[in-house]
Image (tube, helix red, strand yellow):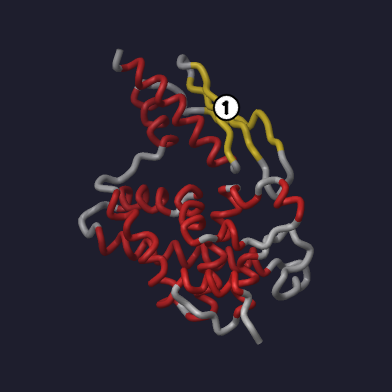
Amino acid sequence: MSRDPRLAALEDRLGHRFADPDLLRDALTHPSLATGAGRRRAHGASPYERLEFLGDRVVGLAVAEMLWHRFPDEPEGDLSRRFTALVSQEPMAEIARELGLDTALILCAGTEKDNGRSNPSILADACEAVIGALFADAGFAAARALVDDLWRPRIALAAAPPRDAKTALQEWAQGRGLPLPAYEVVAQEGPSHAPKFRVRVTVRETGAEEAEGASKRTAERAAAERLLSRITSKDHT
């Protein structure tokens, strides 16, 4: 049986020829479709979502191991901040684009119309699903080798542990004896498979800022960044 040329091209980029090509097809078939283009759902279970679940754990273990070896003298808190930044939605979506998953995704007409191929949340999930498929097809060593290739340059770029904007804003408020930042979802738009959240963050005596994101976490972080940027710029004037 001849292979789908799109999947074959992706296999080349992954550096792995799947013994079970349906695993890769399942990893690219968005759950908005009633049935996958590879295997059908069983009892409502989406193969894509199951592979995403698996891939999330594989990436987490592989990246944690890389950080543990790369920074032998760092405390757990610093390693955790590095880890969180490396496995967040933004780098996952960026890696998905590097692999060409945006063009390889199998989407329903509605998701396609809603610009699903450029949706960071969908791309990040697809990245995890594809890595989960690689693990299911060839084991942890093969999946870890791919994660190493994709994440090692990103690890090398971060000389110091990153500071999450939400954590930095919380520390700023606590350092001034203020209540913790309060986050509120003020709007939610779009379909369930491609939502857009608008979040407001407020710190007493500083006012509020709002931002949008494809997930509540992303919107919260963006809002925190805006408020932190404004209040810290005032601190230096």
Residue at horizontal 51%, vertical 57%? 96
Q: Name the quarter where the N terminus is drawn.
A: bottom right
The C terminus sits in image quarter: top left
Q: Is residue 108 above or below residue 43?
A: above
Image-quadrant location for residue 15 = bottom left
- Secondary structure state at the residue bearing disc 1: strand
- List x then y, in percent, for residue 100: 52, 60
- Percent position (x, y) of residue 26? 65, 70
Question: Is residue 87 rendered to the left or right of residue 214?
Answer: left
> Relative to 41, is 233 on the left or the right?
left
Q: Front-most of 96 and 125?
A: 96
- Residue 122, above or below 185: below
Could you classify mark 1 by the number of other residues whose Cα lies within 10 Å: few (under 14), some (14-19), or many (20 or more)? many
Residue closest to the eye, 111 or 77: 111
- Identify the residue at image location x=70%, y=52%: 112
Q: How many marks?
A: 1
Q: Is residue 36 above or below residue 224?
A: below
Instruction: Give the residue furthest to the bottom.
Output: 1
Residue at point 57% right, 65% down? 129
Q: Position of residue 98 (x, y in %)?
A: 46, 57
Disc 1 target residue = 200
Pick out the residue farthest to the left. 73
Residue farthest along the top direction in this orientation = 237
Q: Position of residue 29 (x, y in %)?
A: 67, 65
Seen at 59% across and 59% down, the residue is 103
